[in-house]
Amino acid sequence: MIGFGNAAITPYLHILMYHIPQFLKDDTCLKSFTGQGVEKTNDIVRSIYHTKSNRHDACKEAILAVKRIDHLQDFERVPHQYTKQNNDYWTNDIFLQRRKKPRLCVDVREEEVPMTQANVDSMSLQEIKDALKSLSIKTKVRKIDKLREILKKAIQRSVQD
């Protein structure tokens, strides 16, 4: 090459100039000349060296890791074949199984007492709003006394019907 002495030509340039045309003719894979495998091996060896403590032989671990990679390189992972056995599991069975398990925190709810006019007087503002909402009554009134009157009238109408 003009401008470069023989000592200045790196191995990559040598491969590029003299061997690539031959590989293209022979349909040989060019990927083997990328140096990617050497770089990956270097990364693994460096990580093993820097993570092992004094009680381990880092060199031995690195050599074993490289050998393990070389040995497993020709194998491909075969995914596990799954055949669905029970089509109703996710729709029914899982709920039944979960109901059978004991619960650590159980919310004990009081039995619902039917609404009467006497109950309305002891209800809080939020309970009155919820009761009106359950009866599908919408109002802009905010005073508790007027909301109680509306709820009592709604209860009277539902009893009469």
Image (tube, helix red, strand yellow):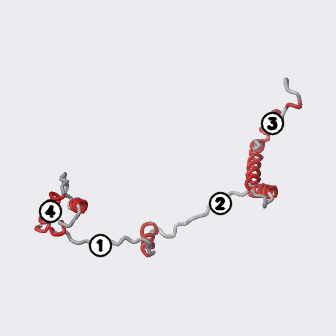
Q: Earlier in the sequence, mark 3 or mark 4?
A: 3
Q: Residues within 10 Å of mark 1 (few under 14, many from 20)?
A: few
- Residue with the mark numbered 4: 154
- Cα separation, mark 4 vs mark 2, equals 68 Å
- Cα separation, mark 2 vs mark 1, equals 55 Å
- Cα separation, mark 4 vs mark 1, equals 23 Å
- Residue with the mark numbered 3: 12
Residue 91 in the image: above or below residue 63: below
- Residue with the mark numbered 1: 110
Residue 65 horizontal/vertical position (percent):
76, 57
Residue 69 in the image: above or below residue 89: above
Q: Amino acid at mark 4?
A: Ala
Q: Identify the residue at horizontal 46%, vertical 69% (top origin).
A: 89
Which is more foreground, mark 3 or mark 4? 4
Q: Earlier in the sequence, mark 3 or mark 1?
A: 3
Q: Which residue occupies the foreground of this view, 69 or 101?
A: 101
Q: Earlier in the sequence, mark 4 or mark 2?
A: 2
- Asked if labels 1 and 4 touch by Cβ distance under 8 angstroms, the answer is no
Residue 13 in the image: above or below residue 67: above
- Residue with the mark numbered 2: 78
